[in-house]
Amino acid sequence: MIQLRQKSSLFGALLLGVALFGIGCKDKEEAKPSGTGKTGETTDTASRGNTVTGDTIKIGEYGSLTGDNSTFGISTHRGIQLAIEETNAAGGINGKKLELISEDDNSKAEQAKTVVQKLVSNEKVIAVIGEVASSRSIMAAPVCQDAKVPMVSPSSTNPKVTAIGDYIFRVCFTDDFQAVVAAQFAWDQGYKNVAVFTDVKSDYSKAFGELFAKKFKTLGGKVAAEPTYQSGDVDFKAQLATIKGATPDAVLIPGYYTEVGTIARQAREVGLSVPLFGGDGWESDQLIPGAGIALEGCFFTNHFFSHDMTEPHILSFIAAFQKINPGKQPGALDALGYDAAKVIIEALKRAKSLDSVALRDAIAETKDYQGVAGKITLDANRNARKEAVLFKIVGKEFKIFKSYRPEQVGL
Amino acid sequence: MRWLLGRIGVVVLTCAILLVANRLLIDNIKEYYISVLVLCGLYATLAVSLNLINGITGQFSIGHAGFYAVGAYVGGAWTMLMRPLVVKSLPILQTGTQLGDHLNLFIALVLGTVCAGLTGLLVGLPSLRLRGDYLAIVTLGFGEVIRIVILNMDVVGGPRGFTPITALVNDHGIPLVWVFGLLVVVVAFSRNLVKSAQGLKFLAVREDEIAADAMGVNTTRVKVTAFVIGSAFAGAAGVLYAHCQTGVNPDSFDMNTSITVTTMVVLGGTGSISGSLLAGIVLTALPELLRYDFIKDYRMVIFSTLLVVFMLTRPQGIFGHREIALPRFLRRLIRKKENAP
């Protein structure tokens, strides 16, 4: 009896599996008649997207307001909010006020997708702003693409993000460009022999290192050594000793500020005194506290923004920013969030009608828009063509050292 | 015979309910709710499968996300890497048609389940000779090892994630049937196991391992079996996760996920299948429900406070060791009615 019961329960589970499979197939037949209705609906959506109804224009934002990358998400959110408030204070667009609906994705990829579905299908937003991290943008972008709602990423630099479809834009440069700029800069500085120290756990770091090496070699330089580390490591002395043995003129560390500080200190400890340089992953208030004086005179590429720039539009941005956030200095992420929102707002002014399809076309036409983080022109691949800047670390400050436009590095 | 017919009846009824619920839901509710429902189903599956190991067999595993990841990546690898090679000789596997989609998902599900089960065996054999805290640390370590191996595999995208994984079942409502179908299978399996004579061995190991050993129960074997089954179900959930999300990222399978699932089991009442099921659904849906106007900014604060309050007021979990079961509930209801007049 017991044996029978066991077998039957197994049998029951199996039967359920088979039956479920059957449902799937049965659905196929059932779906046929309603299927025609469904396809009819999809042709409908092809021309639909989301349309503005009522007195407000809803713009969605998803970001990492809590979780591992919360500092990124909060900075971006401040910038976006500023842009929306400014526009509303100036009377909105065609008499309609803007309404920002921001959702937190907890720094998790699965939540990014869910909240964007909420924004697009429940809130019926006309455009979506987000995310900072490329991995989350990649997960959520297909939702926007399917729903024909434009998505503008403020600072996802991975090339794959905008490749998802024609509704996905970004207002920052891509990693490809940044790596090429770093190579050009190294060559211009007279470094002939550069070691590349990459983080194997980060796609950003790996791609940066590879592209740098490629460009640097075509310029005539030599890559002295290519050791690797993993983010989360705390001891880098073995790799640094290898680098020292290869006697490079400089060391490229395309990683995040969390490790760069430690690496820099340990590099000086093992007697590696050449300049270090890296990418936008270095930008953080935490970089100098982590590195002490070890990074003095080092460089990193970054988005075209600094709070000690003196152009009038930047000064007015900083003043407006500090009115809402007293005592805070805006960083590149605040500026990029502001720009992302502004690109959408400017496009709304130009759009032929207030729906997401017309808005997409208007965003795609963005040309020479003077954002606070550089002049934005969106190219055919929906990436921003804009300059990158090199910061030099002087004491506790990041000073602008040099800037490169895409043309200057052969792009 | 009559009993067997009853079983078949239950199965048919479940399928009918799922099918009808699915039809009603996909036509009437928004994509967002469906995707929350899918996540609820997946996490409930994970919680119930971990309950097999932590609750019913009394081991303490906190590396469940690792097996979830194995399933997700194996399923994804089948659909994106292997299927295109096979499809030439087996045109029935062409995606885009309903039959092809379902067949593909079924194969992915089988492969993912088997691979996760095998990984479970590999992890379980050496480590289940340990007990308590030691076992917890080993499983935690293995969970991380699996994630780091994936992080370094370039064919499945490494750190940038494995995207896109074609949405096999195009109509967005169909995943619901698969996810909840899997959930029903896992719950039914757990329930039947606990009620069977085999299940007594599992419970014996939980209650007193030494006594069980003395009574002739092969404790290691029982523990490994529970571990393999639990891992296999987690793998199945992973396969569905990968296809519902149309992409996976190694970040989704970190220690946090393992801890979340463990929390669900503990909160639901360690050992209670219905408890894990309920906690899995509630803990996934709650943060989404808290996305109201003004509460939104404090949702994580409210969520964690609620967890603390839950654990303080009911340290044994929502249900403790007990279960709520529909038949018994109905019977009690009927009895009450009979007594009433």
Image (cartoon, rainbow, N blue to C red):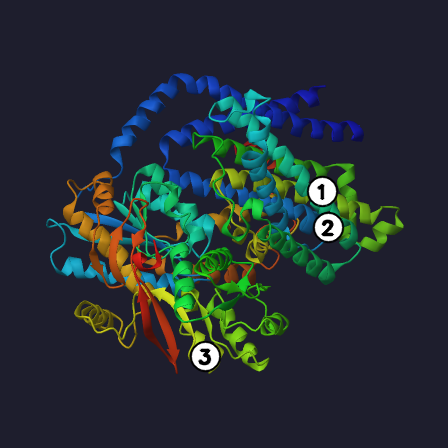
- Identified by mark 2, the residue type is Val
Looking at the image, residue B78 sits to the left or right of residue A253; the answer is right
Distance (Cα) linking label 1 and label 2 = 9 Å
Distance (Cα) linking label 3 and label 1 = 47 Å
Front residue of this view, candidates B163 and B50: B163
- Identified by mark 3, the residue type is Pro
The residue singled out by tag 3 in the image is A289
- Residue farthest along the front direction in this orientation: A220
Other residues around mark 1 within 10 Å, as few (<14) / some (14–19) / many (≥20): some
| Disc 2, SS | helix
The residue positioned 60% from the left and 49% from the top of the image is B153
The residue positioned 50% from the left and 51% from the top of the image is B160
The residue singled out by tag 1 in the image is B118
Q: Which of marks 1 and 2 is nearer the N terminus?
A: 1
Front residue of this view, candidates B336 and B123: B123
Q: Residue B123 carries which label?
A: 2
Looking at the image, residue B292 sits to the left or right of residue B327; the answer is left
- Identified by mark 1, the residue type is Leu
